[in-house]
Amino acid sequence: MIEQLESKRFWHDFDWYLLGACLLLSLISLTEIYSATMNDPTQNYFLRQGAWVCAGIFAAFLVAGIDYHVLSEHIPWLYILSIGVLIYTLVLGRTVAGSKSWIAFGSVTFQPSEPIKMVVVIALARYLSELRSSKYMTLSQILKAAFICLLPMSLVALQGDLGTSLTYLPVIAVGLFIRGIRPAALVALVLAFVLVLPVSWLFLKDYQKERILTFAQPERDPLGKGYQVNQSKIAIGSGGLLGKGLFNGTQNQLGFLPTRHTDFIFSVVGEELGFVGVIGTLGLLAFIIFRSIYNAQTARDNLGLFIVMGVVGTYFFHLIVNVGMVIGFMPTTGIPLPFLSYGGSSVLTAFIALGLVICVRRCRYVN
Amino acid sequence: MLQRDEQELLRWRVTFIGYVIVAALLVLAFGFWNHQIIQGTHYDQLAEQNRVRYVPLVAPRGRIYDRYHRLLADNRPSYNIVLIRENSPHTVQQTVGMLGRGLDIPVESLLERINRRRREPTFRPILLKEDVTVSDIAFVKAHRYELPEISVELQPRRRYTGGELAAHALGYVGEVTEAQLMTPEFVDFRSGDQIGQTGLERQYNSVLRGQDGFKRVIVNSFGREMGKLEEQEATPGNDLLTTIDLDLQRAAEDMLDGKLDPEHYPGEHMGAVVALDPRTGEILAMVSKPAFDPNLFATRISGANWSSLINDPGKPLQNRVIQSHFSPGSVFKVFMAAAGLETGVLNPLESIYCPGHATFYGHTFACDKREGHGTVSVYDAIRESCNVFFYTVGDRLRIDRISQYATMMGLGRKTGIDLGNEDPGLIPSTEWKQRVLKTKWYAGETISVAIGQGYVGVTPMQAAWAMGGLAMSGRLKQPHLVNPQELIKIGFPGGRVLEEEYPIHEETVDIVTKAMWGVVNEGGTGVRAKIEGFDVAGKTGTAQVVGKQSGLKGKDFKDNAWFVGFAPYRNPEIVVAAFVEHGGWGAEAAAPVVHAVMETYYKKKTGQFSDQITTIAQR
């Protein structure tokens, strides 16, 4: 690995454009986190996030440096280790905002369910790429693939973190779709999902039900549960074409935006940088996604393709749910926006995912 | 490994996912286009409403002073608790639930207050509790993060330094009513504004009211002020200098309350006193008892206080000086004498025999002195208040000439005082009876009118005014509590004090005023009003509340006592009318009250007055 890092080849094949886009996003993120929290001197969110970004870049290089085939070889015990960590968290974890999904290292808290998603991505990619040739997957194959994903996913759900557990879904969905399942099975799966929804309603907590009801009917309680989204829409809408300028967003600075440095960071972007800033930021995210898709298309093997597409599914799901939420297209869920939202687990996972994509690209010519 | 065509399919599916993502991103981009470009201005307004709060700055009302710039009414700082529904994180029900306990107000009454103004813009503060205590303020401040929609607002409040002192003249302030807002007078007022509701507060509301200011401030999501965009300071209202002399006012009130001379004049009395300067029309004192404390109205008056004021049989809110008329009794004889002399039906040298009663039109009318006054001149008739004499004069005059002269001299019509709801009183005539009672006048009724009974009704204000006019040889100055010249000084249209003069012979004035001097100074009915060195003249009156023959006894049926006096009897400077409801004899119940006011006036004039009273009022 060290050899690889030192080799000219590594640096030559490295996807600098992808890394550049991510660094630009991190810059926007740090600026807006600074803007969103400059009036709160008690917590130094800006420095903490800066440290996580550095750690993320380091992790990205590390992951990019390891051949993904090596990762794939070691994935069985990594997967078992991950399940162990999730169970540990479930039992001994720390509860934050109603979810027992956190582990504390001193003053630093971490959400293992985020990076473990990448373990699941690799595990599923290995399983799908090693399947014998056939146009469609058999039922037992589907079930096995689903199990790989659903086991950690249900553990996360048990931790009470429904939002994060939902982010495991695109991994299996994208994997199954690309590997190929019969149209009938596809319909059946979608149907099953639709049928499970009303049942899962019974398992939702009151505040979660409230969120969904509010999404369906925002004027239900404009000062209560709909408050966040209303204020977010006001922030974004009032940004106009060019925005109110950095550090000048009134919704942001005067505290009308809730959780503005984490889940609603994109509202701050919308308010302070305007439509231009929104399109620029979305453009960078889109660039990362499409560059990754291109990397998937040009991957040396299907293992690489499935790994990258798992990452793409995760990125996209986070993007659509989070950005959809801040303009009221999606219900309120605590799902962060990759590279932009404040939070160590989220940033680190986004960079690990980036490392995987770069790795797959780097290795495309290796024989 | 997959077959080659399967591999193709796989890559096609990846491309397909790419298309799905493109589509989704386009939807998102459209969403932002819609919010930021198409609806941008709308959301911009919402953001402005969020951050900018309009805070009204209530202007303090002008102060009210007596004629020597001694304070009668000013303002004190007070705090209200208000609700601003805009940006509230709670529903009204939630807010009220949390607040009700802390402020100790029933939730229903809070909801009622809010509902009454629920259609107003949500940024407009709704008053929840006024004039709050320190502990109420502490509760709100302690919960400002849980209840950011609740805040404490400063509002200057009216303070009447003397309590009940001159309550009816000053009047009181209160929130402008919905009905008042509909009238042109209050077109530039808003719901919740304080306005003068009665008395001088009402009459000179436009002078006393200030110009409210406002400020537009930037607030954060907790409603805390972060900066100021614009401020227009409130302009306080103009101070009002009245003609009231606090010392005379206090003397009259204390006398009626039995506090000034408890040895000779004990107990609380209902009634009215008014003192004025007949040369100018300035009112020096205006008392109506029972009174009320206008401070009760400065804060929204409580239901219990209001109903006790409204249901009090003594009608404390009524200004008896100008808003009620009463039979003047023998006070009226003065005007009868003047009318008789002026018309010539009474010869100045004529004497009439009083046997103690007289018969007119088949009815026998009694004199107060059973054994009779014997032969009396007009001088003695006034001095001793002989009924028979005036029955005769009245009979000669007839009702319409009585009416004509009484009206001319200032009775039975509004005096034009600068206070609202003045009662015109009543001087009957044949025309009046035909118009109002739809029957003809009986000559016998004139006999009662001649001694100030029957239909005749006079307000204490009219009694003082007309008496002053007569003593001033027919010159009537419009009575007023605020000199119009003072208004002009502070830039308001003031006009002039109206003056009228009726023709009367100097000889008539001499005879009548000399006789009234006799009433006080030569063993007449008004000896208790006598002041050594100050030629007080006046006339008593004792007006029956029910007919003597009814036999009803008790406090409520006791006669009403009058005394209307002026001094000095030549070139008068002051007229005082005292009316004591159910006081009994005018000589005993009313004359001492006039004496108290006159004596204070005289002491002040001659420099013997200690200003103890002054300090009480200033406290």
Image (tube, rainbow, N blue to C red):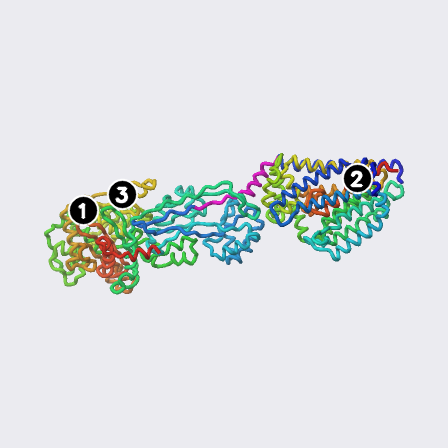
* Residue B210: percent from left, percent from top: 40, 44
Residue bearing the label numbered 1: B473
Question: Which quadrant of the figure contains the C terminus of chain B?
Answer: bottom left
Chain of the residue under the numbered disc 1 shown in the image: B
Give the residues drawn in magenta, as a range: B38-58
x 84%, y 51%: residue: A77
User: Can I make out residue A202 in this image?
Assistant: no
* Residue A347: percent from left, percent from top: 72, 45
Residue bearing the label numbered 2: A358
Closer mark to the observer between disc 3 and disc 1: 3
Q: Residue furthest left?
A: B349
Residue bearing the label numbered 3: B497
Q: Nearer the viewer, residue B373 or A90?
A: A90
Closer mark to the observer between disc 3 and disc 2: 2
Q: Secondary structure at mark 2?
A: helix
- CB under 8 Å between discs 3 and 1: no
Amino acid residing under circle 3? Val
Crowd rating for badge 1 (residues with CA inside 10 Å; few <14, some 14–19, many 20+): many
Mark 3–mark 2 distance (CA, rounded to whole Å): 99 Å
Mark 1–mark 2 distance (CA, rounded to whole Å): 116 Å
User: Can I make out residue B514 in this image?
Assistant: yes
Q: Nearer the viewer, residue B54 or B582?
A: B54
